[in-house]
Amino acid sequence: MTMDSNSMTMPMPDPNPWATAMNNLGMPPIGITGQQLMPDFDPSLGMMAGITPLNPMMAGLGMVPTQLSQDFPVMKEIIHCKSCTLFPPNPNLPPPATRDRPPGCKTVFVGGLPENSTEQLIVEVFGQCGEITAIRKSKKNFCHIRFAEEFTVDKALFLSGYRIRLGSSTDKKDTGRLHVDFAQARDDLYEWECHQRMMAREERHRRKIEDDLLRPPSPPPIVHYSEHECSQLGDKIKDDGKFSEAVHVLLTWLERGEVNRRNANNFYSMIQASNGHIRRLTGEKSQHEKEVEEAKEKFKIALAGIVGQFEQIVSVFQAASKQKAWDHFSKAQRKNLDMWRKQAEEIRNMHNEQLMGIRREEEMEMSDDDMEDSPDSKDSEDSGVSQAEALKEENDSLRCQLDAYRNEVELLKQEQGKNQPMFSSEEDNTHSQQLSFLHQALQGMQKQLLKMREELKEREGELEKSLEDKQQLNNQVQNLKEGLQNLQNTPAVQLETSTQDDRGSEDSANQTSEATVSTVVSCSQEKEAPTEKNPLSPVHSEREALLVGIISTFLHVHPFGASIEYICSYLQRLDTKINTGEVEALLSRLPCTFRQELTGVGASLEKRWNFCGFQGIKST
């Protein structure tokens, strides 16, 4: 009892899981029917004695299954490495989110690494995806890995979501959850742009080669003048078939300046031979014109016959559309007859217009000929007869067109009478829609008008407030001007009285004037600045004031003080003209701001300057 192996067939939607399972067991992947699922299987691989278990991260073994069916999700398995173990994520969870892939991406971001992870561990885990060119590891739990090829990035993204454990430790520093995502690197973008430019150059080169192949060949070069070439060219010019080519050569010789006294006769003879072709060309032209006229006449006769037949067809339709015959046709037949009649009338009108255009052109040509040449009596009689015939034909065609238009108008009136209730209902609907749209537009305009009124009221209130503020400011300015005028008048009076009074009265007047000045100057302090400096001030110039500010900032940063040499070295970076004596004299003039102290013992005794402005402001 034998059984054919081909008769036992079982449906296998996807043989890849079956092949992977047999491959991990070290057996050749063979289907139930006996066919080999993987033709390139290596029997030396597998879970046999002396051979390590297969790792799905190894290159070529399909860590990421290619072209799997969407009905069967990718099953992630535990990955064992030398110094760590990777556990797959929960298959029920959604896939980890990733950013958009940058162009030419070869770099990945790896987060969630254990705190005790090393660069050797990263190479061990991700080196099986592909060749690694660079690793940038941070002090925190993440790094950036750059691969040599772009497709290895997809393999690295397969590890996103895996939990990693170093050895068999359960310490938090030895565990982590990997998060792999695309990273944007300038090197990847530069290489991608270089590759794109190279592809563009290759494409331009390919198109150039194609254009060169498709380009028509360049014309052969024209030979230079010689006696032999001149004699051959003269024979070619006389030949009607080679005349155009020979004339081109003659034109080139003339443009090059090959003519001289010796060969002038030869050129003259060739030009004379070229002139001889004028009579031939005019004869050919007249012959072609005759042929065109004959063809036009034939076309006009044929078109007139076609128009006559169209007229007969239209008259047939008109006879059929009369009430005697029209009532006997069915509704479908009437519809077809109506459509055919309209088509025939349109074609008839188009051909009539074309025929009339030809006749108008002929009449215009005849009138031009009459204007140029004096016509004879016979010619005038013939033209009168032809014009009469043309007018008769025009009259007939116009009469036919008028009948056709009348029939069309009657049919349109009938159709209008039938479809009038339908049109009225449609018009009512359109009118109601238009009224609703207008009503909505009016409501919107009313709302906008109310808003504009409220805004107008608010702006009017703001305008009134601004006018009141402006009036108050004007009053204050007027008061200040009056005070300044009084201030200017009082010193002049006091100067006149001071020359007559003694110093005691002068001092009292000065005190009173100072009191009045202080009251007025307090109002106009923003407009006028004091014109005189205090002669008792220890700071004599703006430069010294700047030095005081810089030294104060410098000593405030040094709470234990600084030597005069240290201070001068700092100031000489800003201005090389500063010397030690000037700085020390300035510091000694400001005892409430800077204080000199002695520090150290014996040979290490040193003078240091300290900033004491915060204590000095209390004493002053």
Image (cartoon, rainbow, N blue to C red):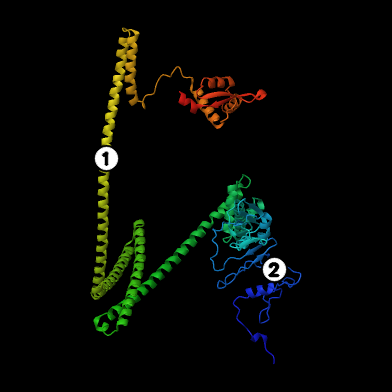
Q: Residues within 10 Å of mark 2 (few under 14, many from 20)?
A: some
Q: Position of residue 114 (x, y in %)?
A: 62, 57
Residue 54 image label: 2
Q: Position of residue 439 (x, y in %)?
A: 24, 60
Q: Position of residue 483 (x, y in %)?
A: 29, 22
Q: Indicate the amino acid at tag 2.
A: Leu
Tag in front: 2 or 1: 2
Where, quadrant-wise, is the N terminus in this rendering?
Answer: bottom right
Q: Residue at x 55, y 60 (%)?
A: 98
In this rendering, position of residue 72 left or right of residue 366: right
Give the quarter of the image for residue 20. bottom right
In terms of depth relative to the viewer, which is nearer, 536 or 542?
Answer: 536
Up-down relation of residue 50 to residue 335 (above or below): above
Where, quadrant-wise, is the C terminus in this rendering?
Answer: top left
Which secondary structure lies at badge 1? helix
In terms of depth relative to the viewer, which is nearer, 476 or 71?
Answer: 476
Q: CA distance from mark 2 to mark 1?
A: 86 Å
Q: Residues within 10 Å of mark 1 (few under 14, many from 20)?
A: few
Give the quarter of the image for residue 508. top left
Whether residue 151 is visible, yes or no, is no
In this rendering, position of residue 294 left or right of residue 196: left
Up-down relation of residue 552 to residue 187 (above or below): above
Whether residue 397 is visible, yes or no, is yes
Up-down relation of residue 252 to residue 480 (above or below): below
**Between discs 2 and 1, the one toward the N terminus:** 2
Q: How many marks?
A: 2
Residue 463 image label: 1
In terms of depth relative to the viewer, which is nearer, 311 or 476?
Answer: 476
Q: Indicate the amino acid at tag 1.
A: Leu
In this rendering, position of residue 186 left or right of residue 382: right
Residue 528 image label: none
